[in-house]
Amino acid sequence: MTFSGINYFAVLAAAIAGFAVGMGWYAILGDRWIAALGKSREELLPDGKPPVATMATSFVAELIMAWMLAGLIGHIGVASVSGGVIIACFVWFGFVATTQLVNHRYGRLPFSLTIIDAGHWLAVLVAMGIVIGFIGA
């Protein structure tokens, strides 16, 4: 397996799209997410905004995720919007949703938190799949 044929512009664009989707997701569901965590906004955001290091970590993680998704889409040979969405959904269902479910159950976290977090990653992966499928893996 080689990663030499990956379209790195598509990877960067997909990571940016995924990050933007995440910002929108938590802008809408942030208060419910905080409540499900059992924390206060002040505890999580003492300065009123997310720490820069946390945001940078998130973006780097999404770059890696987009790179892996592009590699998978390219190697499977389904570099189209529909192919990107399908592969993204398979990755989410097989790896992301399952690990979120297990980790949240062991942590005895509310199921509402599992739905919010797993839904976020589904939206991120689908956005990435669309971008990678459109631009080309």
Image: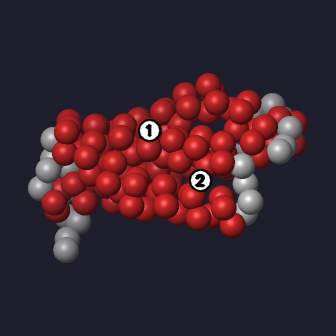
Is there a contact, CB below 8 Å, between mark 1 and mark 2?
no
Q: Which-is-in-front pick, marks 1 and 2?
A: 1
What x and y, as percent, mark residue 16? 43, 38
What x and y, as percent, mark residue 34? 76, 38
Tell me if I can see residue 52 in this picture: no
What x and y, as percent, mark residue 59? 52, 47
Disc number placed over residue 57 in the picture, else none: 2
Of the pair 57 and 98, the residue shown nearer to us: 98
Element at badge 2? Answer: helix
Q: Residue at image x 56%, y 58%? A: 100
Of the pair 63 and 130, the residue shown nearer to us: 130
**Which tag, 1 or 2, sits closer to the chain's start?**
2
Disc number placed over residue 123 in the picture, else none: 1
Q: Amino acid at mark 2?
A: Thr
Tell me if I can see residue 32 in this picture: yes
Quarter of the view holding residue 30: top right
Number of marks? 2
Q: Residue at image x 19%, y 45%? A: 83
